[in-house]
Amino acid sequence: MASLAHRMAIESHRITADVVEASEFPTLSDRYQVQAVPKIVINERREFLGNRPEAAFLAEILAAVE
């Protein structure tokens, strides 16, 4: 998911991607209630756990900006 997020960020100036190691940043892990990885948070509005195919990931991004 991290690789896919970064590839999308490279393709569009409207997308940014940050990857955070949950165990190294416990404050962020607590803030976003990370209990499993990967956990994706989009615009503080949508979040999901686990891997998604590219089309499903893009659908989540688009839903977050509607």
Image (cartoon, grey):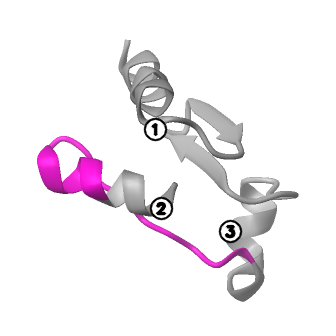
What residue sits 49% from the left and 69% below the top? Answer: 19
Q: Amino acid at mark 1?
A: Asn
As drawn, which residue projects farthest toward the right? 35
Tell me the number on the disc at residue 2.
2
First reached walking from the N terminus: tag 1 or tag 2: 2
The residue that disc 3 covers is 28
Residue 30 percent across, percent down from the top left = 81, 64
Residue 61 percent location from the top left of the image: 41, 29
Q: Residue at x 75, y 67 (%)?
A: 29
Q: Main secondary structure of the magenta part?
A: loop
Residues at circles 1 and 2 in contact by the CB criterion of under 8 Å: no
Does the residue at mark 2 contact the one at mark 3 (Cβ under 8 Å)?
Answer: no
* Residue type at tag 3: Leu
x and y percentages locating residue 7 in the rendered image: 27, 55
**Which residue is identified by label 1?**
43
Residue 54 disc label: none
Q: Please report the bounds of the magenta region as a residue range.
A: 7-22
Q: Quadrant of the C terminus?
A: top left
As for residue 47 lying within the magenta part, the answer is no
What SS does tag 1 mark? loop
